[in-house]
Every structure is written in structure tokens, then in C-alpha cells.
Image (cartoon, grey):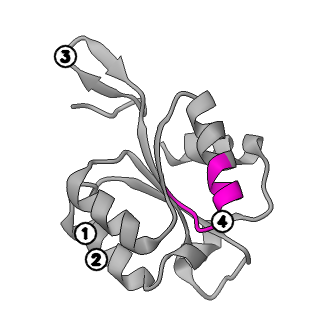
């Protein structure tokens, strides 16, 4: 499969890019998943880092959109990204804060954000 333009290619058919969304807040998780699906992303949405680790063992994702406050410990997710089938996934972090001390947070999507900012960040990650 080829992901050159952000879409997966399988034979002659094009499939939507797949996203693993990790967000503990149920309302926000639903809103983000809805926005991604409307923008033609396939989205698996989970509430916890533990659920994300289970998905990462069994699925390949083009993108991982993760609220760092939903993942404890973040080191386990980092390890899974380096060991699992989603090794080449683009990771976009979501945070409640703009923290320049953490390297991952320097380019994080900071709450609150709108659908336009979310989708722009996903396009930028391609």
C-alpha cells in the first residue's frame, strides 16, 4: 500500500486515510471523530492509552491524533509506535497547554481548537 498523497492505495482503489484518535473526554472525542469522518478519514476513537495500545498492536494507521493527557504513561505509547505496525504513522498531539519544555508539545494542537484548525493540522501532517 502506498500513502504518498495521504490516501492509501490498494490495487486500483483508493481508501481513506486511517486515524487513531485517543481522547478521554467523550464529547470532544465524538466531535473530533465526526469532523474527521466528514473530511473522509476513517477514524477509530478510543478513550485511553491502554485502548490505543491494543489498537496499535492489531491495526496500521496513517495518523495518530492523541491527547497527551489521555495517555498515561506516554512512554508506553512512544514504545508502541516504534514497535508496532503503525511505525510510520504521522503523530499529532493534542494538549490543554502550550508547553515549550516538552518536544512533542512544541507543535501540539492546543485546546480549544476548531474543525478548520484540526483539518489543517491533519493536512500539514501529510
Q: Dot 1: few (<14), some (14–19), or many (≥20) neighbours within 10 Å?
A: few
- Residue under circle 4? 25
Residue 57 vs residue 20: left or right?
left
Residue 80 vs residue 40: left or right?
left
Contact (Cβ within 8 Å) of mark 1 with mark 2 = yes
Residue 76 vs residue 99: left or right?
left
Residue for point 24% across, 11% down: 12
Residue 25 falls within the magenta-colored stretch: yes
Residue 117 vs residue 4: left or right?
right
Residue for point 79% across, 48% down: 114
Q: Separation of disc 3 and disc 1 at Cα? A: 27 Å
- Residue under circle 3? 11
- Residue under circle 1? 82
Q: Separation of disc 4 and disc 2 at Cα? A: 24 Å
In terms of sequence position, does the residue under pointer 4 or pointer 3 come before the other?
Answer: 3
- Residue under circle 2? 79
Q: Separation of disc 2 and disc 3 at Cα? A: 32 Å
Amino acid at each position: 500500500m502506498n500513502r504518498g498523497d495521504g490516501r492509501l492505495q490498494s490495487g486500483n482503489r483508493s481508501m481513506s486515510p486511517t486515524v487513531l484518535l485517543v481522547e478521554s473526554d467523550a464529547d470532544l472525542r465524538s466531535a473530533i471523530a465526526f469532523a474527521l469522518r466528514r473530511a473522509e478519514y476513517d477514524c477509530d476513537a478510543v478513550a485511553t492509552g491502554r485502548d490505543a495500545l491494543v489498537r496499535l498492536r492489531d491495526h496500521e494507521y496513517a495518523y495518530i491524533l492523541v491527547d497527551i493527557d489521555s495517555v498515561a504513561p506516554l512512554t508506553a505509547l512512544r514504545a508502541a509506535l516504534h514497535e508496532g505496525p503503525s511505525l510510520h504513522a504521522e503523530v499529532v498531539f493534542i494538549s490543554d497547554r502550550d508547553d515549550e519544555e516538552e518536544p512533542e508539545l512544541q507543535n501540539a494542537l492546543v485546546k480549544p481548537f476548531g474543525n478548520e484548525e484540526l483539518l489543517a493540522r491533519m493536512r500539514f501532517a501529510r
